[in-house]
Each structure stands twice: as C-alpha cells, then as structure tokens.
Image (cartoon, rainbow, N blue to C red):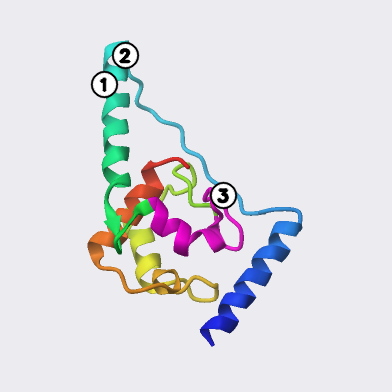
Amino acid sequence: MKRILIVLAFLLMLSTACSSGNSESTNSRSSSNEISTSVTSEMANQNKSSKNNDIENTLVRGQSVSEYFASLCAACHGPNREGLVGPALLPSTLLEPDEVYLKVLHNGRYGTLMMPYGGGPKLNDQEVQTLVTWLKTVNP
C-alpha cells in the first residue's frame, strides 16, 4: 500500500511539474524593523549566519537537516523547497506561528498526500522543531 502511495505521489508530482506550475498564492509581510547603523546590520548578519550554521549542523535521524529534507521531503516539496505536489516551504512563505507547522508535521494534513512525518519515521518533538526552524530561517 505504501509503495502504491509513493508511485501515485511520484506520478502526481510529474504531472504537476509538466503543467503550468504552482497556482498557490503566497502572502508576504514587510518588515517594520529597520536597522539604523551599518555596525548593527553587520552584527545581525553575522548572528543570523551563525544560527543558520547551528541549525544546519543539527541532526535529524542521524542526518543534517538538509540531508533529511532531501531524502524524505524533496519528492513532494521540491529539492529547493519551491513546491511540487506539496506547497513551497520557504522562509518567505512560512508566515504562520511554528505551532501550525509542528502540528502538520506531527499529524499530517487530512485530504492531502501529507502524512504524519511526511510518511517517514516518527520524529521526536525536538527533531520536528529543528525541521520547522530550518524551514523558516534557512534559504535554499
């Protein structure tokens, strides 16, 4: 049964890739915080880069977050998280609070191909939080 679902997901992904593209609309929010000095801006960039490196080096099921995503999630969400069968998973599109995405990862999304944990092994709360943080903060 799982193999049939995988084959169906793959076929749906191929047909979607060959069609006109993803029709999902995305919301955008503008940042209301502006950094007043170049020194502060530089420090913020260094801090963000450091956090991205930290999250990239965190393991999920023995793999880096990006390797885990590539092995399990990329078939539906795209290798660059641009969206295929599933929606785009980019920091610019993930605007809801973390709890929304934690719930989807733990429970799946009824009526879609999104199964709990993307159909992979059950993840603990910290691993799911790591995935959500990575998706919301690291650009592909």
Residue 37 visible in this rendered orientation of the protein:
no
Who's the residue at 44% across and 49% down the image?
Answer: 94
Per the image, the residue denoted by label 2 is 36
Q: Which mark is residue 82?
A: 3
Q: Which residues are magenta?
A: 66-87
* Residue 83 x, y percent position in the rendering: 57, 54
The residue mark sitting in front, 3 or 2, is 3
Q: Is residue 134 above or below residue 11?
A: above
At numbered mark 1, what does the secondary structure look like: helix, strand or loop? helix
Residue 23 x %, y %: 67, 54
> Mark 3 and mark 2: span between their CA atoms?
33 Å
Give how far across and how far down residue 43 sits, in percent: 26, 21
- Outermost residue on the front side: it is 62
Residue 74 is left or right of residue 19, and the answer is: left
Quarter of the rendering containing residue 36: top left
Q: What is the C-alpha distance between the residues marked 1 and 2? A: 12 Å
